[in-house]
Amino acid sequence: MLSEATHLHGVATGGRAGIRRGLTLIELLVVVSIMMLLMAVTVPRLRPAMENRRIREAARSVNVYLSSARSRAIENGRPCGVAIVRDGDLPLAGAKLIQVEVPPPYAGEMEGSRMVFFSQNGLVGTAQFWSDSSGTQLEDPIGTPIGTGLIRPGDTVQFGYQGHLYRIVGITATGPNTWDFLFSSTTTAALPNMLPSNPSPTPQERYAASRPFQVFRQPVTSAVAPLRLPRSVVIDLWYSGTASAWFANSQTTPLKLPYPTIMFSPTGSVQEVAADPFGTVPAIEPIFLLVGRRDRVNPDPQQGNDANHTIPAVAEDGRTNLDDLANLWVAINPQTGYIVCTENSAGTNIAERRQYAREFQAMGGR
């Protein structure tokens, strides 16, 4: 009996002594070292794939955001679009997009509001806003349309709901309820002089000579949330734009207005684009946005060549965003408003590299 109990005790004790409770410190250090070695070998190889994935995600996001603005224009019956906000530290890069929309035209604060306009010279006209047929009641645009920004330089005015549009480039208060409008020299061919021949017209005569008016206002920021591109991914504005209207040039600065903007009409087509330094121009050519890497954006616009939009390489790898075939074009057809994402194809210049996107767009790709 004693020998059997001793045997059982020995077996039990020996069994417990043979159980491994965990790793030793040396074993743990070996495992960690192996993992760090594997990471050091694999991460550099995975980084290009991760960057390419972020670029593809960004291009798809830009496509969806533009399509959303196009849908809003069709649904609301008013032009809507997307503005590309320039980076404060890198003016040729856009990492944030905002949706903008054209508000309803302004035609006065009261029913029957009219504007009397009398030309001082070829470019400046003095305007007064009337709201009473007796000619004794003036509206107060200082506190409403002008003072609060409802009427701003860049807006256009049309008299009598038809005829020529006059673009305002400056507004100055010259007296009680009187403002000087400075008009663009390209829109003053038919500036009306509404005042009667009487050199000192009465308020009634001024009102009789006035006309109904509409002020077509510039786009304002909509309530749609902005789109921020993934980290280190931007729209390279140096290479973006149309064939004849670039979104940036050698004089571009972070605060320069207008921001590059693409406006869709209620029919779904592209109505106009705001390009630097051309201002707002009709959309008659395909629009191209190059989605690429932030570190390959030209940091100094004055280094570039405006004629062919070439720049010296600034990235460590000696490449520009136009050279990287992993980057993507987002192309917009101006007639249909259709948007496609395509690869950055090989070529000797920017026109050849955009050609693949143009051909893919012509096939109806989305």
Image (cartoon, rainbow, N blue to C red):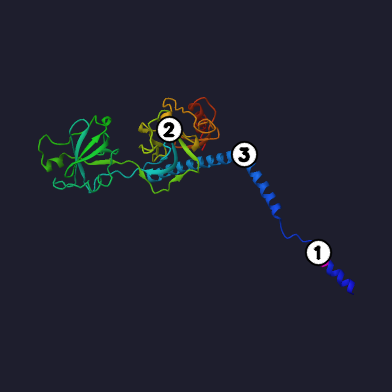
Examine the image and state in which quarter residue 13 appears.
Answer: bottom right
- Find the distance from the CA under tag 1 to the CA under tag 2: 75 Å
Residue ID for mark 3: 45
In the picture as drawn, the residue positioned furthest to the bottom comes out as 1
Residue 2 belongs to magenta span: no
Q: Is residue 249 left or right of residue 363?
A: left
Q: Residue 191 occupies which quadrant of the picture?
A: top left
Magenta includes 14? yes
Which callout, 1 or 2, points at the residue further toward the start of the chain? 1
- Horizontal relation, residue 280 to residue 7: left or right: left
Distance, label 1 to label 3, CA atoms, is 48 Å
Instruction: Judge by depth and name the residue closer to the eye, 289 or 42.
Output: 42
The disc label shown at residue 15, or none: 1
For the residues labelled 1 and 3, say whether their Cβ atoms are less than 8 Å apart.
no
Instruction: Indicate the quadrant containing the N terminus: top left, top right, bottom left or bottom right.
Output: bottom right
Name of the residue lying farthest toward the front: 26
Amino acid found under the numbered disc labelled 2? Asp
Q: To which residue does mark 2 refer?
A: 300
**Disc 1 element:** helix
Instruction: Tell me the mark number nearer the camera, choosing from 1 and 3.
Output: 1
Q: Earlier in the sequence, mark 1 or mark 3?
A: 1
x and y, in percent, of residue 254 in the image: 39, 38
- Per the rendered image, the range of residues in magenta is 11-17
Residue 58, percent from left and from top: 50, 41
| In-front residue for pair 131/24 | 24
Q: Secondary structure at mark 2?
A: loop
Mark closer to the chain start, 3 or 2 = 3
Main secondary structure along the magenta-highlighted residues? helix
